[in-house]
Image (tube, rainbow, N blue to C red):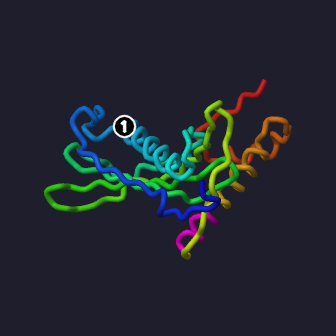
């Protein structure tokens, strides 16, 4: 296995026609179906990069920007944005295309943290990322920044702190009633 790989060596894309069985009660394609497809393509990309079975460790924010209609083609694209020792951040972009008009809509983008596993289920080292352009550098740096923000947030609200007074300002203007025992 290579020590470093270019992102384009592991890129994958799939296109699927959205059928009536993919729709929710509102007649649009169900978000859960799209999330399932996103997880599958993140798995394929991470497995291709690491040459290993991979599991999803986390998903960073999924905002549904535009609805997807039954009858549209949905294209999912995935690439490795970041590599740690055993984990990878896979960027996933979802677009829909109206087959009659050719109009393409960006539906969402998200970041899946995937971890490579060996045959015993233990975390396995992955090849590093060989960055060849400014776009790759930007994606890697943004992944590091997201990772640091998660760490900062998780350690700030770890449950061991008794700083309830500091949290009160967050309640201002919110639809909440505080009734502490």
- Dividing the picture into quarters, in which one does residue 149 lie? bottom right
Question: Which residue is found at the position 84% from the left and 36% from the top?
Answer: 160
**What range of the chain is rendered magenta?**
135-142
Residue 42: x %, y % from top left: 48, 47
42 displayed left or right of 129: left
Residue 21: x %, y % from top left: 25, 32
The residue lying toward the viewer, choosing from 18 and 48, is 48
Residue 100: x %, y % from top left: 13, 57
Quadrant of the image containing the C terminus:
top right
Find the residue positioned furthest to the left. 100
Question: Which residue is found at the position 60% from the left and 67% from the top?
Answer: 130
Residue count near mark 1 (Cα–Cα under 10 Å), binned few <14, some 14–19, many ≥20: some
45 displayed left or right of 105: right
- Dividing the picture into quarters, in which one does residue 161 lie? top right
Find the residue positioned furthest to the front. 1
The residue lying toward the viewer, choosing from 105 and 53, is 53
Residue carrying label 1: 33
In the rendered view, would you say 156 is above or below 98? Answer: above
In the image, residue 139 lies in the stretch drawn in magenta: yes
The residue lying toward the viewer, choosing from 48 and 73, is 48
The residue lying toward the viewer, choosing from 87 and 126, is 126
Question: Which residue is found at the position 49% from the left and 50% from the top?
Answer: 48
**Predominant secondary structure in magenta?**
helix
Q: Secondary structure at mark 1?
A: helix
Find the residue positioned furthest to the top. 181
Residue 177: x %, y % from top left: 65, 33
38 displayed left or right of 179: left
In the image, residue 137 lies in the stretch drawn in magenta: yes
């Amino acid at each position: 296995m290579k020590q470093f790989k270019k992102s384009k060596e592991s890129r994958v894309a799939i296109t699927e026609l959205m059928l009536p069985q993919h729709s929710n009660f509102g007649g649009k394609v169900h978000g859960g179906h799209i999330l399932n497809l996103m997880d599958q393509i993140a798995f394929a990309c991470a497995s291709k990069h690491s040459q290993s079975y991979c599991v999803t460790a986390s998903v960073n924010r999924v905002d549904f920007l535009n609805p997807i209609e039954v009858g549209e083609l949905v294209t999912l694209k995935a690439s490795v944005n970041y590599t740690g020792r055993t984990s990878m951040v896979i960027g996933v972009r979802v677009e829909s295309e109206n087959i009659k008009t050719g109009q393409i809509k960006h539906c969402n983008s998200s970041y899946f943290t995937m971890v490579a596993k060996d045959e015993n289920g233990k975390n396995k080292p992955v090849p590093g990322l060989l960055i060849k352009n400014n776009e790759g550098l930007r994606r890697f740096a943004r992944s590091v920044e997201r990772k640091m923000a998660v760490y900062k947030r998780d350690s700030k609200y770890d449950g061991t702190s008794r700083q309830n007074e500091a949290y009160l300002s967050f309640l201002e203007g919110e639809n909440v009633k505080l009734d502490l025992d």
